[in-house]
Amino acid sequence: MKFSWIGLCVAVTSVEAFTATHHSGNIKNLLCLSRMTATGVEDDLGLTPELRKMTDAFASIPDEKMRHKQLLFMASKLPPVDPAIAKPENKVPGCLSTVYVDCSLETDKETGKKIVRFVGDSDGLLTKGLVALLIRGLSGYTAEEISCVNPEFINAAKISQSLTPGRNNGFLNMLAVMKQKAAKLERTAEEIGTSEESKHDIVTSFQEKDGKPMYNEMMGTLIRLLKPSKIELVDNSDQHAGHAGSKGWEESGESHFSLVIVADAFSGLPLVKRHQLIYMLLGEVMPKIHALTISAKSPDE
């Protein structure tokens, strides 16, 4: 039975048509153990739709030499990469040939999800074909979807029959590195996003009050040095008229304050230490007022 590359393309195209029809549905979003194949059968290999499509296409080729040729064909179609990719952190260990892979993160316009795009290269043609297979099968999916892929699909695709033990180990290392890179990239993006959100939560300025020099000085100092996520300073001096010390600072009459402040600096500190920290930061301000009531908390409180 003759089997040509054209025949393989036809098989791939038919699956592509099905995938395109259902792409906007739930196929891409299913969990590892419930990802479905194009025939509606549960995919116990956790493959992405694109990787399942190629696995089925390769498995349908009855000739081992033809599968070998298809890998070489895929190698020839792999887009050239920036030479800058060839750095130690992108090198895949344990490969007979030299292999470099890297990835980037982008937002899917339809789903809003963070998806991974891979690039890679190898100085060995057959190994380069395996790189091309993985790049095509894993690009465009989330780190979670990529992590679900079972390396046993290489056997289901009957590609392992064309590989020496050394190349098979190299393939396993390639897939492992690509999974690790995708997961690390996603974690980094999440950490940056969390950091940016935290920056937006930090109070960086306040509305100065005319005739309230003590209030303005206290607010400015605490915001600048503690970088609070919340701060409220209330002048209660009018409630203490006639009391000792009620004259307050100079002519402003500022004598009694109530402070509510939330800042990372208070994490792990007992109440007394938090108050002492505020007194220390306010420095020369404290002797000029009669009383300061404090509620100091950490963000997780």
Image (cartoon, grey):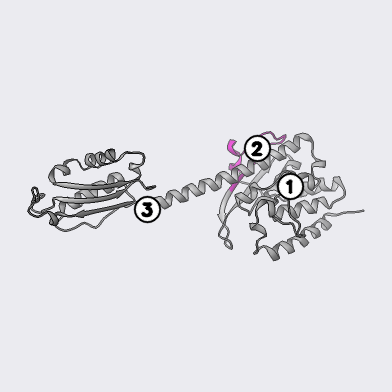
In the figure, residue 2 lies in which quadrant? bottom right
Q: Secondary structure at mark 2?
A: loop
- What is the number of the mark on residue 201? 3
Q: Amino acid at mark 3?
A: Asp
Q: CA distance from mark 2 to mark 3?
A: 41 Å
Query: Which residue is pictured at 55% across the width and 60% down the height?
Result: 112
**Does 70 sit left or right of 182 as displayed?**
right
**Does 4 sit left or right of 277 as displayed?**
right
Of marks 1 and 2, the one in the foreground: 2
Q: Amino acid at mark 2?
A: Val
Query: Which residue is pictured at 22% across the width and 51% down the height?
Result: 258
Residue sitting at the far right: 1
Q: Kindly tell me whether residue 230 is visible in this rendering.
A: yes
How packed is label 2: few (under 14 Cα within 10 Å), some, or many (20 or more)? many
Residue 85 place in picture, x, y as percent: 60, 42
The span picked out in magenta is 83-103
Residue 135 place in picture, x, y as percent: 67, 49
Sequence-wise first label, 1 or 3: 1
Sequence-wise first label, 2 or 3: 2
32 vs 116, nearest the viewer: 32
Asked if the stretch drawn in magenta spans residue 86, the answer is yes
144 vs 182, nearest the viewer: 144
Q: Kindly tell me whether residue 123 is visible in this rendering.
A: no
157 vs 81, nearest the viewer: 157
Residue 158 place in picture, x, y as percent: 81, 46
User: According to the image, label 1 marks what residue?
Assistant: 75
How packed is label 3: few (under 14 Cα within 10 Å), some, or many (20 or more)? few
Q: Secondary structure at mark 1?
A: helix
Q: Amino acid at mark 1?
A: Ala
40 vs 121, nearest the viewer: 40
Depicted 15 relative to depicted 156: above or below: below
- What is the number of the mark on residue 92? 2
